[in-house]
């Protein structure tokens, strides 16, 4: 039995963007608690702290979590790292077809904590509608027997917030892998428009952009999807970068061709290495929920950047007990901004993404998936 009372108390807070709802010092106590937990239970973690000039004894009084040495997300592409609670835990991977895969273990409490955060955020935005059946267009992988791919697992979970009438998949199983079903996606959108139920479109933006462009090119009439429909995208464009459309332009096209209001078009940022959800507000900014903190680090010397300066994106959150991924540096460049500069009313900081850093061969779900467009 894992005993992490401060961590569990933080993750259980129901107002995801209300700073005043967080008891004084709770985040620091939770981070100390999870860091000490990994020192005691995860092989090699205390040596990692010591190698970075941090003693485990200092964790109890630490209140500047930029001092906690993070692990690069790419490290998890080369090493499966977990403690005792991860031995028989759910394993999720990051890559869809080939290339390096991050393999992450999520014990029951860690996954429940991450999903609980999504619950709180969906309820905050009014997207938890158990009495409103929806049709779903999942622009992700049609699942095989067991779902181990992170994006597919997430999309299946996101279908729990409104009852499923029926589901159409963008990446269909062919017996030899997955293939993007361009005309199946367009046909599903047309049928959903006629059926009259709200539609939820989830998944990779590149596929939706490709389908809408094809509709325009082939003279398919604009549709009017029912009120309360929702577009919730996730993942980048990767190998389709040359065709990438800025999100505000994609949202405008969704509004024009599918009739979905702009505030109901959102993007989510997440990764299998860090399961805390970062979801755009109505002004389309990624606000940081109270369950985590974000730092931006200068690539040349790893110092923490002030507001308005771009650098490597780091997430710090105590939610995960199965792997020492409570301080992770991503491969993305970002800029952090103060909450008040958004104008949506949420007080928490928000970050702006600038794309992947470097030119390494590391791959993600979106990269592997986007290659399937080439055959469409």
Image: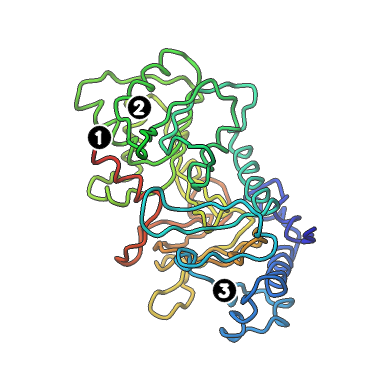
Q: Earlier in the sequence, mark 2 or mark 1?
A: 2
Q: Nearer the viewer, residue 346 or 310?
A: 310
- The residue sitting at 38% across, 24% down in the picture is 259
Q: How is the image coloured?
A: rainbow
Up-down relation of residue 86 to residue 123 (above or below): below
Mark on residue 66? 3
Mark on residue 244? none
Residue 336 rendering spot, x and y as whole percentages: 47, 62
Q: CA distance from mark 2 to mark 3?
A: 44 Å
Q: CA distance from mark 2 to mark 1?
A: 11 Å
- The residue sitting at 44% across, 57% down in the picture is 101
The residue to which callout 1 is attached is 376
Residue 103 rendering spot, x and y as whole percentages: 51, 58
Q: CA distance from mark 3 to mark 1?
A: 45 Å
Q: Nearer the viewer, residue 243 or 44?
A: 44
Residue 208 rendering spot, x and y as whole percentages: 34, 35
The residue to which callout 2 is attached is 185
Tag nearer the camera, 2 or 3:
2
- The residue sitting at 74% across, 76% down in the picture is 60
Up-down relation of residue 263 to residue 342 (above or below): above
- The residue sitting at 71% across, 70% down in the picture is 41
Residue 165 rendering spot, x and y as whole percentages: 54, 20
Label 1 CA crowd tier, 10 Å (few <14, some 14–19, many 20+):
few
């Amino acid at each position: 039995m894992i005993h992490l009372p401060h961590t569990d108390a933080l993750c259980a807070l129901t107002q995801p963007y209300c700073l005043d709802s967080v008891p004084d010092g709770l985040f620091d106590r939770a981070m100390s608690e999870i860091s000490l937990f990994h020192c005691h239970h995860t092989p090699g973690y205390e040596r990692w702290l010591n190698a970075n000039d941090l003693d485990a004894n200092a964790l109890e009084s630490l209140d500047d979590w930029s001092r906690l040495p993070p692990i690069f997300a790419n490290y998890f592409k080369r090493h499966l790292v977990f403690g005792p609670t991860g031995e028989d835990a759910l394993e999720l991977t990051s890559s869809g077809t080939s290339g390096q895969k991050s393999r992450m273990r999520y014990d029951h409490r860690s996954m429940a904590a991450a999903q609980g955060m999504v619950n709180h955020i969906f309820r905050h935005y009014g997207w938890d509608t158990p009495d409103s059946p929806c049709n779903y267009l999942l622009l992700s992988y049609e699942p095989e027997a067991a779902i181990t791919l992170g994006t597919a697992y997430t999309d299946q979970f996101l279908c729990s917030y409104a009852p499923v009438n029926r589901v159409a998949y963008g990446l269909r199983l062919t017996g030899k892998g997955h293939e993007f079903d361009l005309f199946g996606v367009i046909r599903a959108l047309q049928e959903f428009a006629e059926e009259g139920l709200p539609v939820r479109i989830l998944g990779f933006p590149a596929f939706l952009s490709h389908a809408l462009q094809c509709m325009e090119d082939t003279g398919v009439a604009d549709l009017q999807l029912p009120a309360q429909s929702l577009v919730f995208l996730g993942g980048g464009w990767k190998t389709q970068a040359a065709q990438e459309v800025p999100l505000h332009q994609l949202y405008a096209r969704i509004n024009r061709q599918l009739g979905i209001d702009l505030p109901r078009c959102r993007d989510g940022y997440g990764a299998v290495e860090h399961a805390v959800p970062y979801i755009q507000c109505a002004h389309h900014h990624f606000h940081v929920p109270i369950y985590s903190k974000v730092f931006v680090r200068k690539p040349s010397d790893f110092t923490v950047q002030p507001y308005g300066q771009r650098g490597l994106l780091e997430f710090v959150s105590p939610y995960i007990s199965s792997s020492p991924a409570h301080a992770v540096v991503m491969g993305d460049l970002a800029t952090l901004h103060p909450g008040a500069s958004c104008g949506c009313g949420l007080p928490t900081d928000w970050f702006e993404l600038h794309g992947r850093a470097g030119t390494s061969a590391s791959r993600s779900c979106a990269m592997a998936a986007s290659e399937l467009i080439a055959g469409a």
